[in-house]
Amino acid sequence: MDESKIIVRRAEVGDAPLIAEVVCMAVGYDISHPIYSIVLSLAQRIDTQYSYRNTLVAEVGGVAAGAVVGYDGARLVELRKHIYPLLREHLGTTPHIEDETEAGEYYLDSLAVLSAYRRRGVGEALVNELCNRVFDEGYGRVGLIVEQHNHRAEHLYKTLGFERVGERKFLGDDMWHMQRSTPYNVAERIERSTIITPFQRRVYRELLNVPAGDTITYGELARRIGCRSAQAVGQALRRNPFAPDVPCHRVVAADGTLGGYNGAREGAALERKRRLLQDEKRG
């Protein structure tokens, strides 16, 4: 076996100890910290942000050398809820954790390479493989956050195609929000996507024909694709993984009101829909 060859594969449940170690390394702890036990438990499940199902493992010469954890940013709240009972159990408290990501990006949560395998391109291989797989599924952006003082890490991500898109606060630290964009346009992403149904694909294709600044009702969109159910169209838009590139904000209720957005009928989500429409009408 070529001992220098890097192979990236999907993680298995047996990789949970490696995943826990990688997450600890990414946040600056060693495996003696209580966080290790917490992540070890989460990594063995299928419904958490640190699940083995959200992880890729790099092997060098057949030996696990590092891993990257990532997931759809729209699922952050759903995936994170399982960590709070474990934090209370192991730490006796539940710290406030700011949102690291949001809908509209696939989030690179944690990346680390074991010390014996650094400077061999393992980290780069993990990031590139994650991005390639994510873009092949139809996602438009991979996002991450990095400490503003960690110039070495920021430089690495820049060489891999990431650029600053904003700032965030996380666990009290000032972070750069960075993203890498897909090489495919939105129509190609719809066709390539493996995470949508044939019905969703029909809805999204037709929605691309609605010009910026215009709106269409759920019923009219349903009629254009030969569907009798405006509700079915609404459900497809609620699950739209391409927003705002597939502009579900341009779809309104039959009475002219906004309807819903990202599954909400009020609050911040609906305000975002309103702003998107206003910005488009202003040109």
Image (tube, helix red, strand yellow):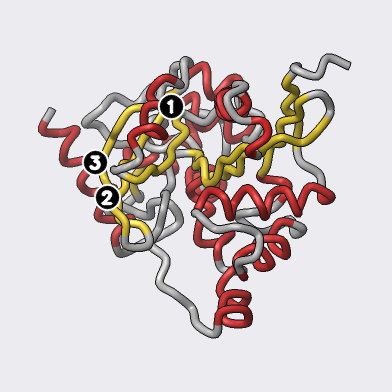
- Position of residue 249 relative to residue 92, above or below, is above
Q: Position of residue 214 (x, y in %)?
A: 25, 32
Q: Are marks 3 and 2 in contact (CB under 8 Å)?
A: yes
Looking at the image, residue 94 sits to the left or right of residue 51; the answer is: left
- Judge by depth and name the residue closer to the eye, 277 or 118: 118
Residue lying at the far front of the rendered structure: 116
Q: Please provide percent x and percent y for residue 134.
A: 58, 30
Q: Quadrant of residue 207?
A: top left
Which quarter of the figure is the N terminus placed in? Answer: top right
Name the one closer to the observer, 244 or 176: 176
- Kind of element beneath mark 3: helix
Q: Horizontal and vertical percent for residue 20? A: 67, 55
Element at label 2 = helix
- Indicate which label's residue lies in the foreground, 2 or 1: 1
Residue bearing the label numbered 3? 276
State if disc 1 and disc 2 touch (CB < 8 Å).
no
Front-most of residues 154 and 281: 154
Could you say whether the residue bearing mark 1 is in a helix, strand or loop? helix
Residue type highlighted by circle 2: Arg
Looking at the image, residue 231 sits to the left or right of residue 172; the answer is right
- Residue 43 position in % (x across, y down): 71, 56
Q: Nearer the viewer, residue 214 or 160?
A: 160
Separation of disc 1 and disc 3 at Cα? 33 Å
Is any atom of residue 111 visible in this view? yes
| Position of 266 relative to 108 (above/below) | below
The label on residue 272 is 2
Residue 81 found in image quarter:
bottom right
Q: Which mark is residue 156?
A: 1
> Residue type at mark 3?
Leu
The quarter of the picture where the C terminus appears is: top left
**Callout 1 amino acid:** Leu
